[in-house]
Image (cartoon, rainbow, N blue to C red):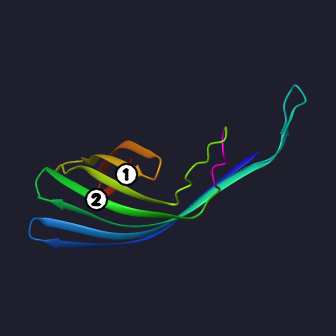
Amino acid sequence: TEKRNFAALGVTKFMNLNQWQAAGNAQLLSSGSKAAAYTLSNAAVLNQVSSGVTQLRVGARGSYGSGQFVPYAGLTYSQDLSRPDIAPIAGQTAANARDAFIVQAGVNINQAGVVSGTVGLTSEMRKETRNTGLLATVSMKFGGVRTFV
């Protein structure tokens, strides 16, 4: 049996200055998983395993324009408040950096009709690692109510 949990609490402040839009935010994120011990068909026993992370993030994001395509850029500082360290492997010790900077750039796509969304790149940079990803969201409007996918 495996159990997973995730919780997030955040606050965001939006500001408009002519064609510029800015947003500042702070978030507290927590996730974890726990897998119970079990026995394989060859009688090998696997012990219970658990892991988790709690992060505090503070950042800002800005965009310019009000048309169909609005570019944006953002920067976030992330601090791991709790998480397990990476154990040494073959005599090499990981940096176990607990802080990171997350850089974002992309474009918001604003359609007057039913569909709008976002396409962007994000890169989380730590002392010895970098995680880069492509983010795409789609928002569909049904009868005046907006749904995010």
Q: Residue at the spot x=57%, y=54% of the render?
A: 96
Percent x, y of residue 98: 52, 60
Outermost top residue: 42
Secondary structure beneath disc 2?
strand
Secondary structure beneath disc 1?
strand
Outermost front residue: 91
Percent x, y of residue 55: 52, 64
Question: How many residues crowd around disc 2 within 10 Å: few (fewer than 14), some, or many (20 or more)?
Answer: some
Which mark is on residue 55? none
Kindly tell me whether residue 142 is visible in this rendering: no
Q: Is residue 55 above or below residue 111?
A: below
Q: For the magenta stretch, what is the residue range?
A: 85-89
Left or right: 36 with respect to 16?
A: right
| Residue 88 drawn in magenta | yes
Kindly tell me whether residue 52 is visible in this rendering: yes
Q: Confirm or deny contact between disc 1 and disc 2 (CB under 8 A).
A: no
Pick whichever, 71 or 112, lies toward us: 71
Q: Is residue 127 above or below residue 45?
A: below
Percent x, y of residue 129: 46, 46
What residue did someone put label 1 on?
A: 148
Percent x, y of residue 142: 31, 51
Pick whichever, 133 or 110, lies toward us: 133
- Along the polypeptide, which appears first: circle 1 or circle 2? 2
What residue did someone put label 2 on?
A: 74
Tell me which secondary structure the magenta stretch mostly adopts: loop
Q: Is residue 44 above or below residue 49?
A: above
Q: Residue at the spot x=22%, y=68% of the render?
A: 22
Marks 1 and 2: which is nearer the front?
2
Q: Residue at the spot x=62%, y=59% of the render?
A: 83
Left or right: 144 with respect to 2?
A: left
Task: Report the amino acid beneath label 1.
Answer: Phe
